Amino acid sequence: MQTVSFRPGEVYVVYGVFFTAHSRYTGYVYTRQFRFSDMMNDLDQEFIRLQDATFQRLHAARQEEVQAGSLVLNRDQIILAMPRDIAGYERPPDRAQMVAEREQLKVIIEAWPFTVDGTIHRVQGAGLIDYIHDPLRLFLPVTQCAVAYNLNPNLNFQAPFVLVNRRRVELMVEATAVGRRQPIRPTEVLKNVEDREFRPEAVAAFLASTPMFKSILPEALAAACEDLLGRGLMGRRWYRAGTNVFTAGGTGDMLYIVESGRLVAYVADYENREYPLATFLQGDLFGEMAILGDTVRTFSVRALEHSVLIGIHQEAVLELVKQFPSLVTNLINALVQRHGRLAEARRAAIGT
C-alpha cells in the first residue's frame, strides 16, 4: 500500500487488483480509507475509479495486459479484490489482541467462476452464516489463499490476502468437510438450481426455444456453445434476489438471456427514486445494446428473485452472427421491440 499522507483526513493512494467474472483490472485508487478492506466496504462507494489502470481478458488465448488510463468499476461486479502490494507492519496492541481472540478456520468458497481455498478469522462461536451476513462488510477477508479460476486452470494463483464479494458467494464450506483429493464441486449451490456445470447440449436446447435462437438447429447450436464455453465467452451466471446484474451508467460487453427467475429493469432519478421499466422472465434477453457498440448501460437490472442467466460476450455474439446469419433479423426485431417498450416506459415514469 502506498500513501500520500498518514495524517487523519488526508487522501491515500492504494494500488489494487480487481477480478470480475471475465477480466482482471489493476490500478491506483484515491481513498480516505487507510485500510484496503475499509475502502472496499465503504458504504457510500458504489463505483471505484482506477487510475493508471490496466486490464486483461481472462478468457483470451493470449494473456495480454492493456493500458486503459482511467476507468470506473461497478463494485457489485467485482468478485475478488486484493491490494497489489501488502506492506509489512506491526499491528497496534488492541488490534493484535482482537485477531488473536478470533477463531481461524480453513474454508473453501465458491464465487463463480472462482474457487478460494483459504482461512477466515471469525468470532468465537459464530457460524459461517454469521460470517457471510456481516452487515458492515460487503467484502469478506480471507487469508493464505489458493485461488482457482475455473474457466482457465492456467490462471490459478496464491495470495496472502483476498477480499471476496459476499453477494457472489454461492457456497462456503469448512475445508475439513471436503475430500482434499477430489475436485472442488458443490453438490448443491443453491436450492432449486440445476447442477452448475455448463452442459452445451442442455443450454443449446434452452436457447433454441427462445425467440433469438429459434431458427438454429440445436445440434449446430450445441457445437457452437461448446466452443464458446471453452474460450470463456459464454456461461451461466447466478444472481440472488436484490443483486444488480448491471447499473445505469456502467459499461458492459455482455448480452443476457433469462434461463430462470424474474428481474426488473429500472431507472433512478437524482434523489435515487427508482422507476420500473420492464420485467424480464424466462426466455427474455437484455443488454443487447452493449454488443452493438453502445457500451454504456442506460438502465439498471436487478434480480427480484434468485435468477439464472446465460451470459454471452460481445465477441461470441459476433461469431454466432457470422455462423448463423438469421440471428441478425432476430436480434434486430428484439432490439426494436425492446427499445420501443423501454422508451415508452421511461417517458411514463420520469418524463424523459
Image: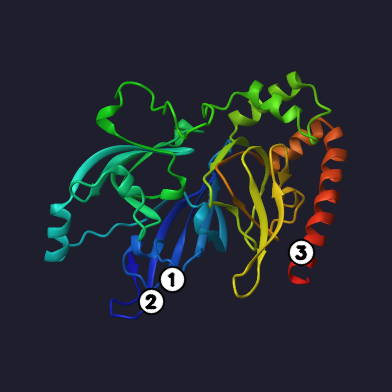
What color scheme is it?
Answer: rainbow
* Up-down relation of residue 194 to residue 112 (above or below): above
Cα separation between marks 1 and 2: 6 Å
Q: Do the numbered discs 1 and 2 sit on residues whose CB atoms are within 8 Å?
A: yes
Q: Where is residue 170 in the image (x, y as percent from the top left)?
A: 44, 39
* Up-down relation of residue 21 to residue 244 (above or below): above
Q: In this view, does 125 lie to the left or right of 44?
A: left
Q: In this view, does 76 lie to the left or right of 320?
A: left
Cα separation between marks 2 and 3: 39 Å
State the residue position of label 3.
346
State the residue position of label 2.
11
Label 1 is placed on what type of residue? Tyr
Q: Circle 1 — which element?
A: strand
Query: Tag 1: Cα neighbours inside 10 Å, few (<14), some, or many (≥20)?
Result: some
Query: Tag 2: Cα neighbours inside 10 Å, few (<14), some, or many (≥20)?
Result: some
Q: Can residue 161 be seen in this view?
A: no
Q: Where is residue 56 in the image (x, y as percent from the top left)?
A: 54, 48
Residue under the image location 15 percent in, 66 percent down: 92
Residue under the image location 75 percent in, 27 percent down: 208
State which mark lies toward you, 2 or 3: 3
Q: Circle 2 — which element?
A: loop
Q: Position of residue 194 (x, y in %)?
A: 54, 28
Mark positioned earlier in the residue sequence (3 or 1)? 1
State the residue position of label 1.
30
Q: Do the numbered discs 2 and 3 sit on residues whose CB atoms are within 8 Å?
A: no
Viewer-nearest residue: 280 or 160:
280
